[in-house]
Amino acid sequence: EVAVDGGAVSLMDLTISNGYAAEHGGAVMNSSIATVTIADSVVRGSTAGKTGGAVENHGGGTVKLQRSTLTQNYAVEGGSALNNNLNGRVELMDSSVSANSAAVVGLDESLRGAGAIANNAEHDELGTIVVSGSQISDNHAGGGRSGAGIWNKATGRVTIDRTSFSKNVAAADGGAVYSGPGEVTVTSSTFSENSANNGGGISTGGNLTVLDSVFTKNVGRDWGGGVHNFNLGGVPIR
């Protein structure tokens, strides 16, 4: 495991595999307010007993993932690929997040495991996740969990641009993206063949704006194949 406790750190042109942490950050753990940049790298096959199977942004710092891949990682509670805690910021640019699920450790992915990316925003903090030009696919959230692609737990903010979500499966709601009372903005993105109980593409109880995006063959087993809105306000989609 790479542990960051201060200062700016850059990890470039690396393959990090088979990391393990009993609690947080199986491969990379940022426990400070530092900025960690992961560029042109692959993180695979890493696990965490709680959150951040591959990468954990734990102390309110910043993690930047550029032209990199997070694949076949697993966490029990949140963020099998990447977990953002407190008021931290995560930026994914031109990257791939795929096949993160309990299956990588031999467990039933329908019964166990967190989705790929989590924005925890604990203690009423406002965590931020920005995703652009990326692919998020074939991730699973099991055991009654929501958000196989991205899970925006509380009052966090998620911005998605020019990104594709495909074949993400949630045991509960939001196959590609789930958001509680937080804010989600989606532009110029595609959602295809994602599935969940409600909102195969997106399920939200907060503020959602979707612009210039495409939804195809997403499945809501109960409600909302493309988008499921469970708040009392409107959802701008155009």
Image (tube, rainbow, N blue to C red):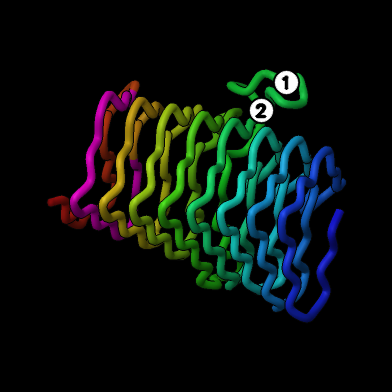
Query: Which residue corresponds to the image point at 79% horizontal and 50% vertical from the top-left?
Result: 27
- The answer to whether mark 1 and mark 2 are in CB contact below 8 A is yes
Rendered view: 192 above or below 181: above
Residue lying furthest left: 238
| Residue ID for mark 2 | 112
* Residue situated in front as seen by the camera: 81 or 197: 81
Image quadrant where residue 182 sits: bottom left
Mark 2 packing: few (<14 Cα in 10 Å), some, or many (20+)? many
Query: Which residue corresponds to the image point at 38% horizontal and 41% vertical from the top-left?
Result: 164
Say whether residue 44 is left or right of residue 153: right
Tell me if residue 213 is in the magenta stretch.
yes
Image quadrant where residue 111 sits: top right
Q: Position of residue 143 (x, y in %)?
A: 60, 28
- Element at label 1: loop
* Residue situated in front as seen by the camera: 222 or 178: 178
Which region is colored magenta?
202-220
Q: Characterize the magenta stretch by its predominant secondary structure.
A: strand
Say whether residue 169 is left or right of residue 49: left
Amino acid type at image mark 1: Leu
Query: Which residue corresponds to the image point at 54% horizontal and 32% vertical from the top-left?
Result: 139
Amino acid type at image mark 2: Arg
Query: Which residue corresponds to the image point at 47% horizontal and 28% vertical from the top-left?
Result: 169
| Residue ID for mark 1 | 107
Mark 1 packing: few (<14 Cα in 10 Å), some, or many (20+)? few
Q: Is residue 147 visible?
A: no
Rendered view: 37 above or below 213: below
State how far apart marks 1 and 2 are (Cα): 7 Å
Q: Is residue 169 visible?
A: yes
